[in-house]
Amino acid sequence: MKKTAAVSAPAQTTSTTRKLVVLALLSAIAYISCLIIRVPVISFLKYEPKDIFITLGGFLYGPLAALACSVVAALLELPVGETGPVGMLMNILSTAAFACTTSFIYKKRKDIFGASIGLISGVAVMSVTMLLWNYLIAPLYMGVSRADIVPMLSTVFLPFNLLKAGINAGFTLLLYRPFLLVLKAVGYPVSDHFKDKKSSIIIVASIGACLLAACIGIVIILNRS
């Protein structure tokens, strides 16, 4: 028994170290992606792809890992952000709503169907919950009253979040298997749950749903302008 414990302890330590390395790498990539890709969309809001990489971490290690990456990436972004601590809080809430919802559902069903349902749910949860948080918090960094925020909820914040979450969900689904292959190539033991015969059909349908959400956001934005 003592010998078994002595053998298993280093293995557990190695596993934890690998997990921390992967999550740190994904948080760093998420941060760098914010610096490189910031596309103005509507009003002061800009699209950036960091949620993709944080969700990949959630797929691998669960919703708490996704939450941790959300916090780390937001802290790294704080010195270069334009909205200070309040903006950092909004970034955490937005990313966590998407990535934690997605990875929580995927944790319950680790196959392509679970990933697809998780991503579509992540789009919905992020888009809806951010309406509440934008109503409560946006006046603090925009310098306007909540009465001024109300008309922006359906014309600015909702379409932007649908667009952002829809695009990120589609790319997450496309990149997950290549991401697993990269990890395997460098010696990380991961499981591929995307090998069933129906995977391609579900992937196409899920990406279509994500793109539909993005298109709805674009249409609303274009009609507003």
Image (tube, rainbow, N blue to C red):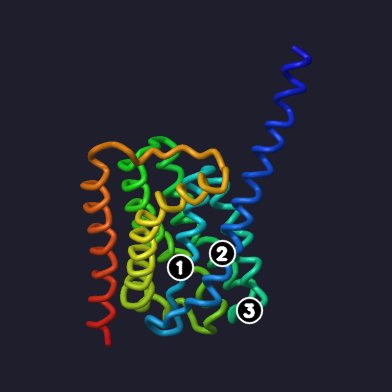
Q: Is residue 218 above or below residue 178?
A: below
Name the residue type under label 3. Answer: Val
Farthest bottom residue? 225
Residue 49, horizontal then vertical, whole percent: 45, 68
Say whether residue 86 is left or right of residue 49. right
Residue 185, horizontal then vertical, whole percent: 51, 47
Residue 177, horizontal then vertical, whole percent: 40, 49
Which residue is painted at 58% across and 66% down in the image?
89
Is tag 1's residue or tag 2's residue first in the polypeptide sequence? 2
Foreground mark, 1 or 3, reads: 1
Q: Which residue is mark 1?
A: 49
Which residue is painted at 52% across and 61% down in the image?
93
Marks 1 and 2 sit apart, C-alpha to C-alpha, by 10 Å
Is tag 1's residue or tag 3's residue first in the polypeptide sequence? 1
Marks 3 and 2 sit apart, C-alpha to C-alpha, by 16 Å
Is tag 3's residue or tag 2's residue first in the polypeptide sequence? 2
Q: Which residue is mark 3?
A: 80
Q: Quadrant of the N terminus?
A: top right
Give the numbered dot on residue 29. Answer: 2
Foreground mark, 3 or 2, reads: 2
Say whether residue 209 is left or right of residue 62. left
> Callout 3: few (<14), some (14-19), or many (20+) C-alpha neighbours within 10 Å?
few
Name the residue type under label 2. Answer: Ile
